[in-house]
Amino acid sequence: MREINLHVGEGHKERIDLYLSEVEHIATRAQVQRLLKAGHILVDGRPVKPSHHTRHGEHVTITIPDPEPSWMVAQSIPLDIIFEDSSLLVVNKPAGMVVHPGSGVRDGTLANALLAHCKDLSGIGGVLRPGIVHRLDKDTTGLLLVAKNDATHLALSEDLKARRIKREYLAVAWGIPRTRDRIETRIGRSRADRKKMAVLRTDGR
């Protein structure tokens, strides 16, 4: 467990979750919100909600809890590594491989393979997603970024959010489309099958 202390500087009146994620770069916004919900972030000694707006001079204490022990086992699964250095892995995920455990899948995932390949991975993704910066569906093949440390994880997450990292997808189409169309809709978790994504009338992205 480690503790971070800071004082809000002049001119900052952002929401506390935005301030800590985008100004101080403590963690991603979602991770900051989880820390706030768990009471690990105090402003002048008191817990606050993510909607709290910062004020000049406030003292912020962030407690980063130790990583939770993982039940995941390291599995020696072959990885198609495109690039690797001390901070980053770029892996070509094959179709049919699940990225991390969930929805009844407990092993044989990319995360299991990464645990066997690397001794240390960023813990920001949580115990089930060590080092994993983004995901691909099970049946999708393609490049995945894997961070070996928290600083790299945070930097890559910010680059993805700011669209400084360009992603291209190729799809196999049946037949030849007569026209070029653009589809805009709301996509989210299927209410009929939680393992699938679906077009939603409300919510979604």
Image: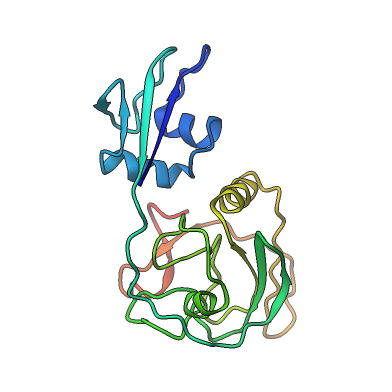
Residue placed most toward the observer, 179 or 201: 201
Image mark count: 0
Horizontally, residue 157 falls left or right of residue 69, namely right
Q: Is residue 124 above or below residue 20?
A: below
Horizontally, residue 42 falls left or right of residue 159, namely left
The colour scheme applied to this rendered structure is rainbow
Residue placed most toward the observer, 145 or 73: 73
x 47%, y 33%: residue: 20
Q: Is residue 191 above or below residue 125?
A: below
Q: Is residue 120 above or below residue 4?
A: below
Q: Is residue 9 above or below residue 61?
A: above
Q: Position of residue 150 (x, y in %)?
A: 54, 52
x 46%, y 58%: residue: 123
Horizontally, residue 132 falls left or right of residue 59, namely right
Q: Quadrant of residue 199?
A: bottom left
Q: Position of residue 16 (x, y in %)?
A: 40, 29
Q: Position of residue 58 (x, y in %)?
A: 38, 17
Residue placed most toward the observer, 197 or 115: 115
Q: Position of residue 157 (x, y in %)?
A: 58, 50
Q: Quadrant of residue 93?
A: bottom right
